[in-house]
Every structure is written in C-alpha cells, then in structure tokens.
Image: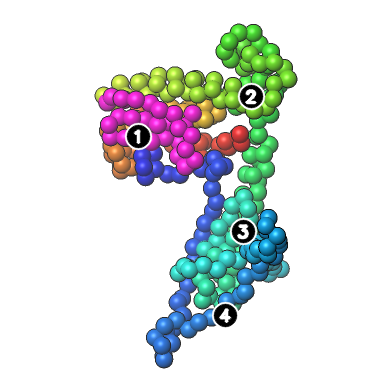
Amino acid sequence: MTDKTEPLRQLSLFDGVDLFIPTLEPAPSPLLGTATPQPIEPRPVAFRPDDRGQDAIEAAPPPLRRYDDGTHRFDYVLRRASRRSIGIRIDDQGIVVSAPRWVGMGQVQAMLADKAGWVVRQHGLREQRRHAQQAARIDWRDGGRLPYLGRTLTLRLGAEGGNPALSACGSDLCLPLPADAVAQRVRDTVQAWMQREAINLFRQRATHFATRLGVEVQAIKLTSASTRWGSATACGVLRLHWRLLHFSPAIVDYVVAHEVAHLREMNHSARFWQTVDDLFPTWREARSALRHSLLPPW
C-alpha cells in the first residue's frame, strides 16, 4: 500500500481480468527481411451527417463474434493492435480479445480453444460479482440501508438538529433532511458524515499502532483513489480510503496497521510482513475478508 501496493480489488470502479498469451512472430521474408504481411480485416465505419450538414465518418463498434466448441460458448470482441501477444480481457463490458495485426484467425481460434474453460469461468464469476454489486447498491432515501463498520444502518430522514447522528440504539443514521429530499442531497450528506467519522477513526487507530511500533504519524489524509485502499510516505503521511468504513473494524485495522508498518519498512519484504504480524496478528484473515468484500456502488 505504498506506491507499489496491490490493487484495490472491490471498487468497481474498479477491475477486469487479463490473460496474455505469447505468440510466434511471423518468419522474416527472404526478400525483404521483414514480417510477411497478413491480410487485415477491414474495420467497419458508420456514416452520418454531422451538425454542420456534412458527412462525417465514425468508427463503428467492433462486431461481436461467437465462440462455440460444443462445450463452451461465449461472445467476444476482437481488436487488432500493435502488440506482440494475444490478450484476453474480461470486464463489465464483456470479453475482449486483442491480437497483433499479423496474427491470423486460426491462431486466435486455437488460443480461444485452449483457454475457453478459463474464459467461461472468469466471465461467470464476473457476472456474479456484477449482480451482487447491483444488489448492494444503496437506496438514498428514508429507509435506505448503509453498510457501516460491520453492521447495517437504516437511513432516517426528518431528524432535528444540525448534524447527522446515530440513534441511541446505534442502528439508524438520523439525517437532518426533509423526508422528500432528493437522492443526491441524501448521498452528499451521508458522504460528509462518513468522511468525518473516517478521519476520527483513522487517527485513533493509527495512533494506537504507531505507539506500539515506536513511529510517528505526521498526518492522515482521506483518499478516494480507485486503485488502492491506502498509502504511506517516508515522511509519515498516511492516506486512507474513507469508504473503508463500509467494512468491519478488523478490515479497517488491517489497512491502518499495514500503512503504519510502512513507516518502519517502506517495502513488502519479509520484515515488513513480520511487522504487520506484530501489530495485527489476524491480518491474514482480515486481508482475505477485504479481498472478498463488495464495495457498494455509489
């Protein structure tokens, strides 16, 4: 979780699955000493008048292709690019195969035949995760549900007072907004509250772990980065993602302890992980829980 930390895996923002397959480059031409040219499939274009009444040419999206070997079946898009290997990317947009311009369809089909099982499994997992994320979407209105530090809060609009506050029983988040407040206003109010809670909690937990380790945290800043949960600098500045508060206290402690450990070891060496273990012995379980947790779409 320094600049070379593992990627944040729950943001949807955030993350596709990539697979790269090396290919054999074409043999040099005996006459020219360069790659033997292969025919390139023409790229379709669509024509339409532009705003000034002139004809404009726009690239049409690549057509979907079907792979079907009788056991595995899926649709994919083939893109030609200046590259040295065949790559498969699976994300929320579907399956994309990127191939060098000189690779023939026979080699592409052979690669798909070899990786078809993997593609189907990964695409299925991706679809399951996408549906789960949609189910976890927060409804920004009275009665909406908000994951918060291992429990679920119910949003309650119409509360009196100037600031959002937890109810006495700790199960409701009472917001000083009219009952018919628009979703954007409800979301902004909850975000501001969560960020205030996050900075307070992060300071408390960072102080706890830094005192144990004998290091000093100079500052804590909130981040909403799409690729990491936290980072640390050699001068003692920690940056932590405020939406960690959607997860359990153990996950928060793991991330904070991880970043505090970087104040001793600015790397991911064996000594670094031993430092994390000294600070937070159950870090393996918390890291696994974080990797399998879903960040609710906002």
Q: Quadrant of residue 159?
A: top right
Q: Residue at x 65, y 63 (%)?
A: 56
Q: Residue at x 39, y 43 (%)?
A: 5
Q: Which residue is denoted by mark 4 in the rendering?
A: 39
Q: Can see residue 63? A: no
Labels 3 and 2: the sequence-earlier one: 3
Image quadrant in which the N terminus is located: top left
Say what secondary structure mark 1 lies in.
strand
Q: Residue at x 31, y 25 (%)?
A: 217
Amino acid carrying mark 2 in the image: Arg
Q: Which residue is denoted by mark 2 in the rendering?
A: 185
Q: Which residue is denoted by mark 3 in the rendering?
A: 95
Percent x, y of residue 50 = 68, 58
Percent x, y of residue 76 = 64, 62
Does the magenta run of residues contain 231?
Answer: yes
Find the residue positioned furthest to the front: 52
Q: Which residues are magenta?
A: 215-242
Labels 4 and 2: the sequence-earlier one: 4
> Foreground residue, 289 or 204?
204
Amino acid carrying mark 3 in the image: Ile
> Foreground residue, 154 or 30?
30
Percent x, y of residue 126 = 61, 49
Labels 1 and 3: the sequence-earlier one: 3
Do labels 4 and 3 touch, CB within 8 Å?
A: no
Mark 4 or mark 3, whichever is nearer to me: 4
Mark 4 or mark 2, whichever is nearer to me: 2
Labels 1 and 4: the sequence-earlier one: 4
Labels 2 and 1: the sequence-earlier one: 2
Measured along the vertical axis of the image, is residue 76 above or below residue 258? below
